[in-house]
Amino acid sequence: MFEVVVPLYLIVISLCVFSYLQHHALSASIKQIAKDIEDRLNGDVKVPVSFLDELKDEMGDLVHETIQNLQPPNAADHVMGALAQMIQMRTMQKFGMVAPSLNAPVEDENV
C-alpha cells in the first residue's frame, strides 16, 4: 500500500506546485497588461487630424442622407396607425387586459 500512496502523494504535490507557479505567472502577466492599459489611458491619446476630418465628413453625410430621406406621413400612414390601435384595443379586451377608465377612482389593493 505504501508503494501506491507515496507516488500518488508526490504526483499531487507536483501538480499543486505546478499550478501555483502557473497561477503566479498568469497573475504577473495580467498585472503587467493592466498596468500597460492604465498607462495608455492616462497618457495623451494621439488621433490623427485626417481621421477626425474623415469621421466628421462621414457623420455629416449620414445625417444629411437621413434628413433627405424623411417624408411626412401620408393618409395611409394615419389609417394604418388607427387600425393598429383598434386591433390592439380588441386584443387587450379579449385577454382581459383593459386599462381602467380615466374617470374611475383608483383602488388600493393593500386596503
Image (tube, grey):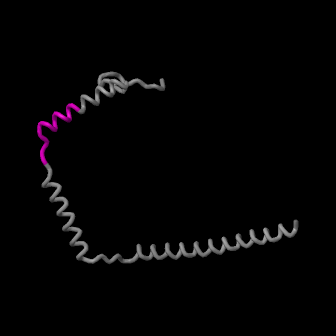
Q: Is residue 98 magenta?
A: no
Q: Which residue occupies 63% across, 73% down? A: 22
- Residue 5 occupies quadrant: bottom right
- Residue 72 occupies quadrant: top left
Give the extent of the magenta segment. Answer: 71-83
- Residue 97 occupies quadrant: top left
Main SS category, magenta section: helix
Q: Is residue 80 magenta?
A: yes
Rendered view: 62 above or below 50: above
Rendered view: 98 above or below 76: above
Rendered view: 24 above or below 95: below
Which quadrant of the rendered structure holds the N terminus?
bottom right
Residue 88, percent from left and from top: 28, 30
Q: Which residue occupies 37% across, 26% down? A: 95
Residue 8, percent from left and from top: 78, 68
What is the count of numbered marks?
0
Rendered view: 78 above or below 35: above
Which residue occupies the foreground of this view, 95 or 49? 95
Which residue occupies the foreground of this view, 73 or 14? 14
Which residue occupies the foreground of this view, 48 or 16? 16
Residue 4, percent from left and from top: 83, 67
